[in-house]
Amino acid sequence: MIPNPDKQSVFDKAAGCILEGGNVEAHDTNTYAYVWKTSGLCAEPSGLLHYAQIHHVNTLDRSTAVEMEGLVAYSTTRGPMQALITKTASPMWRFTDTTEIPISFYPSHAPAPSDAEKCKIKETLVKDIDSKWKIRVDGSYYFNDKAAQKYASLCLMAVDPSVVGAGPDSGKLLQRCLSKLKTILAPFLTNSWKYTLKYDTVYRGILSSQGFALNDVNADFGSTMYNDHHYHYGYWIVTAAIVNKLAPTWSGLVELNRMASFLVRDVANPSWSDPYFTKFRSFDWFRGHSYSHGILSFADGKDQESSSEDMNFHYGIALFGQVTGDEELASIGRLMVKLNARAIQTYFLLTDANRAQPAKFRPNKVTGILFDNKVNYATWFSPQKYAIHGIQMILVSPVTEYVRTREFVSEEWDQVLSRIPDIVNDNLRNPWLSLLYVNYATVNKTLALTKLEKCKMDDGLSRSWALYMAAARSGI
């Protein structure tokens, strides 16, 4: 905090109002509030003095609180925090965000017929559907999860007229796709993989049993220790939503939805009355994003690495609530998507105008790993820039374009990505480039499509989906 003697009277005036805690209220898909628990003298003219992060101030309803000019504190990793004074009899902050982020299975624009034909998206889709699908019965939940959503996305394209047309063959293609998808989902429905999911009575959650079987807290990225649950389970929840949309009469749907609901409740249970799961285990409503780190302590504090997989989880619960008729879940999911998008754009994706990170750090364009106590331009698994940036792009979904703005994509490409040796040397054997080029389609669709026709794919990305999503972007 920077001392400001001229503002001493403000602190004196607010000193009688003591903050003890607070609750979050979700009012609708645009509005949420922090209702503060206080004691002492908190009604006007004194009020509660507390500090807000950048994304709070940008959406603040100033009928509930106002900024105190010249009173700023600095957080460890999220930039300046502005002092606010509440104006209501019962102290609260209310926020309204009217940004439109459609929750849809499909991108906002269908690929142009010329792009679909030139890139042979339909032919590529048929190849992807007829290829050998792999999900290991003894594999990682994370990699199995990625594969499930990858394959489910093929089935979405199989009913999109912009890809397959309107002929009788389109229905046959969908049925082939769904038949294979149901087969690979069977072990998930029956929880019959080698490392089954287990319910934990201590922290009240769903765990991979691999860590117990191998006596290894780091097995499957630490899933047994509650690491990365929103990353892993988001893929299954999106997959379940897709199956609900495309196969609403499938006999396995009840069991699929039961399993998916367990995973929703593990990560983002919205109910205090649910005795089996912790409420909003991963998502921090003050920070606006989830935490990756589970129950083990870490010197640098909790962290988040993959902002895009965080978003995929929120997108997934919004879709799942939408197709299953759970309007409360759908509404909460839509609100979380909006809040998370704003937090990602403020703290993870760094435009030249960003205020959250120091000027010397901004040229990196992404935070890498955002801890509570430090920001580390790195990943947990690779020092390569294509991985540091690619982990913020993995996977590609219809909400990606609303998080990664054209302004940011252009700056990131021009200042960092275009200079990476694998881009300069056109190393299309590097699967990370598939993510980088789908992202770049926002700016230069023509070049991106050319590269995506040839480059090796990320293991969670099919070539047809990469071409489809790139062709749907607005880049020239």
Image (cartoon, rainbow, N blue to C red):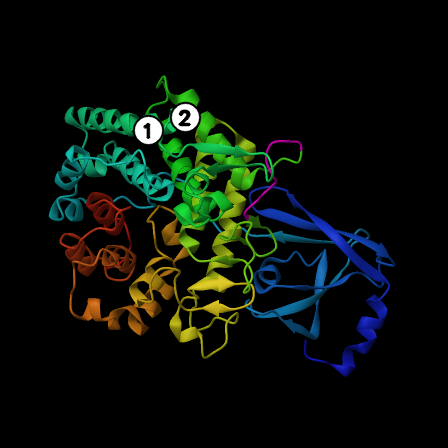
Q: Quadrant of the C terminus?
A: bottom left
Identify the main secondary structure in magenta: loop
Q: Quadrant of the N terminus?
A: bottom right
Q: Residue at x 62, y 47 (%)?
A: 32
Q: For the view shown, which residue lies furthest in the bottom direction?
A: 5
Front-most of residues 337 and 235: 235
Q: CA distance from mark 2 to mark 1?
A: 8 Å
Front-most of residues 45 and 424: 424
Front-most of residues 184 and 426: 184
Q: Please, what is the three-letter code of the amino acid marked with disc 1? A: Leu
Residue 305 to residue 120: above or below: below
Q: Please, what is the three-letter code of the amino acid marked with disc 2? A: Leu
Circle 1 residue: 185
Residue 41 percent across, percent down from the top left: 87, 59
- Label 2 with label 1: CB-CB less than 8 Å: yes
Residue 108 to residue 15: above or below: above
Q: Give the side of residue 169 with respect to residue 111, left or right.
A: left
Q: Residue at x 30, y 57 (%)?
A: 439
Kind of element beneath mark 1: helix
Residue 181 to residue 24: above or below: above
Residue 70 to residue 271: above or below: below
Quadrant of the image occupied by residue 135 = top left
Q: Is residue 442 visible?
A: yes
Q: Is residue 321 visible?
A: no
Quadrant of the image occupied by residue 157 = top left
Residue 333 percent across, percent down from the top left: 51, 41
Q: For the view shown, which residue lies furthest in the front direction?
A: 215
Asked if residue 278 is among those painted magenta in the image, a careful observer would answer yes
Asked if residue 167 is among those painted magenta in the image, a careful observer would answer no
Disc marking residue 256: 2
Q: Residue at x 46, y 61 (%)?
A: 345
Residue 250 percent across, percent down from the top left: 35, 19
